Structures are given as C-alpha cells and as structure tokens.
Amino acid sequence: MRIDIVTLFPELCDSFLGASILGRARARGLFEAHCHQIRDYTLNKQRQTDDYPYGGGCGMVLYAQPIADCLREVQRQCAAAGRGKPHVVFLTAGGQPYTQSIAKRLAGCDSLTLVCGHYEGIDERVIEAFGDEEISIGDYVLTGGELASLVVADSVLRLQPGVLAEAQGFQEESHWDGLLEYPQYTRPEVWEGRAVPPVLLTGDHEKIAGWRARQSHERTMTRRPDLYEAWCRTHPLTPGRWKRSERAALIRTEAEWAAAAEIYTAGWQQLCADVCTADYLAAHTTDFMKRELQADRAAGWAFYLHSTAGEPDALVGVCHRTGEIGRLYVAPQAQGRGIGAKLLAFARKKLAEHPRPFLTVLDCNRRAIALYLRMGFRPAGVHAVYDPAQDPAASAFCRELKFVYTPSENEEGAR
C-alpha cells in the first residue's frame, strides 16, 4: 500500500510514520509513505497558502490551487509506479464519523491520500474536484488535520499484512467486530491487593474464550449501548437445539403454577430492584405473582413452563388474542444456557396466526433488549413511562418499550 499525506507539517507526519511498529514495518517495505509540503506547490513568492474567506468571517482558508497541484503530482507518481488513481480523503470537521469499518475499507486501497485541513478549512472547490470522501475523527475541533490524518493512517496501516505479528492482534481488539475488547492483565498475579481473574490462570482456553466473550459483551453493553445495539442488529441469533432433557409444556397443575410463580418472582425482583421502591418490591410475593399469572390466564394468556431434567427453570406466556409474548423469565441458576432464546422462538411459533408478535421490556433490561434485537424484534415506540415524580411505585425513571417481530426478507418471501 502507498499512503500520501498532504500537509503544512510534513516533518511531524513523517516522524510519526517512522517510529515504533509503523516505523519498523515501513523500513521493511511493508508499505510506502510520502508526506508532501503544501507550500512547495504555491505560485507566490511568499509561499502563502491561505487567504481571507469570501463573505467575511474570522480565520483563514487554504487555497485550492496548491492542494490541487500537489494532488495532481501524487496522481502522476502513482501512475508512474503502475498504481491506479489514489483514493483521496479530506480530513474535515464536517466529514463522516470515522469508524473501524471505514478503516477496514480504506485498508483495501492500493493508494490512499490524506489531505490535512487547517485554519477555518479548505476551499470547497478543491474538495469537490478531488475528494472521494471527507472524514472526521470525532465531534471536536483540532487546530489542524495532521493529528486526524495520523489517526487514520495508523488505523489503516496496522491492518496491512505483516505490520502486526499476528492477524489476531487486531481481530480481537475493540471495534473489529463491533464490540469493545475484553479487559487485559499481566504480571504480577496480585497488584496492590487486586488479583487477576482466576479463569485466566487455569490454562483452559475454552473457558478463557468464554470469559473474554462475556466481558466483551458486558463492557460494550454498559459503556457503548449504541455500539451494542448496532452489533445485535447485525448478528442474528439462532437458538440452539433442544436437549433431550428439555421440554416446555402448558401449565396445568397446581405444582406447575407454584413453580412458575417462583421463577416469575425471582426474575421480576432481580429486574426491578433498581427501579421500584422497597415497599412495592416487598408486596410482590410469590403468592401475589401466582395470582397475577392466573389472572392473565383468565384473560386469555397461555403459559408454558420449561424444565431441564425434570427441574422447572424458565417461563414464557403468549396471548393468542393480541399476539403478545410476555413473562419470559429464566431462573437465575439456569441463565447463560440459551434457554431464553429457545423459549422466545418457541413462543413466536405458538403465535403462528400472528406474523408480527410483539412484547414489551424495560429500557434498563439491556440483556433482554439484546436478545430481542438478535432474534428479529425491532423497537416500535414507548409502551409506558414510570416516573418517580408521578408514580409512587417507581424509584427511578424508566420506560417500557414495545418491540415487534420483523420477519427477514426470506421469511416474507416464504409467506
């Protein structure tokens, strides 16, 4: 790959590209880098690169001419070397937000040229004439585009073959697959009273991989819910097969109602602990929840109890009249085994007469929202709002969101 940076400070950019990992890769010929001084292409004796903006205003604007001539020279050099026309990126505050997916795309370019803005910006006409795209590395303003261009250059060049010792070096990092990276640890095992998680010392690669995956999901879910929602939308979940020891049956007996009420109570208490008052939580006893389930049954709901090896461990309900799925709870000791996904698919199939069944979920229940998104359910507005200022049972503001199942194109075609 060849990368060119068009800048007023080529020494700054060149020194960065010659240091550390990139410097070693450059010395080995794993990529080609050139930094061009815009002033070398000016036509005035003062080598002036900027002037006052038309229409007035503070600051100065970079001329189109020297940048254009510099870009033409880069194109000529690329052609002389047998390369195609370079992909030209202008680093501007108004560009599209830079992401790892863009870095992957740019890493596939044979020739990439980055143009650094300065002052109040660049004459728009040269951007229109030469720019393939504009990029911003964040919602803030820098004094110049050099730092932005180096951010792009670093993120692109490290993806070139051989720059990092192993492809795994970047494939498990934050943002590669849309998630944040899991936490890392090194020696000593205990530092200032803080120990390395025991699983990392076991040598069991399967357990370590599982721990890292859970940490990656948890960290993304907590720190960047926007990223996690996008990841869920693009990573559909296919429920695992039912084990021979598993079954889900319509609740009929008193013992089954009692087991369902216990699962419902434990799950509800766990979910609502941070958003409901202590008195409200205390009022929701197992007996109370049992009566609530049976009242729903009288209103037309059907409830199914899931069990593994004869032990009840999950609950789900469906309403054939409205097409709603509800009361999906997995006992704490059975969580993390994929039972929730299986039961959600089970409930949707029970509602075959409703091609777009729906459900509701509190916005604080991120795990459930992630599951619903991965299982094809999409947000469809706010069902209810719980505000402590108006609702004496609420201890924190939260919303109950409505999600509707959205069939894939293949499913729609099959219908």
Image (tube, rainbow, N blue to C red):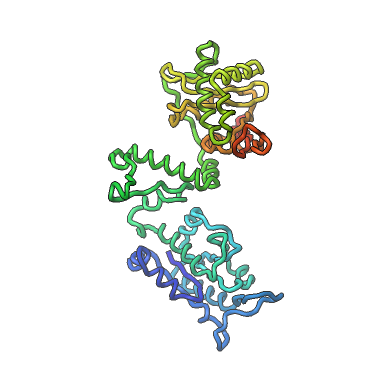
Q: Which residue is drawn at 57% across and 80% down?
A: 49
Vertical placement of residue 60 versus 326, above or below? below
Give the percent coordinates (x, y) of residue 19: 36, 68
Residue occupying the point 49% across, 32% down: 238
Picture coordinates of residue 231, whole percent (x, y):
51, 44
Residue at the location (68% across, 74% down)? 57
Q: Can residue 109 be seen in this view?
A: yes
Q: Is 247 in front, or is 222?
A: 222
Seen in the picture, residue 188 relative to 160 is either above or below; the reply is above
Up-down relation of residue 15 to residue 39 (above or below): above
Residue 327 vertical placement versus 2 (above, below): above
Comparing 278 with 225, the one in front is 278
Question: Between residues 129 and 236, which one lies in front from this camera angle?
Answer: 236
Looking at the image, can residue 381 be seen?
no
The residue lying at 41 percent from left, 69 percent from top is: 16
Query: In the rendered image, which quarter is residue 31 located in?
Result: bottom left
The image quadrant where one finds the N terminus is bottom left
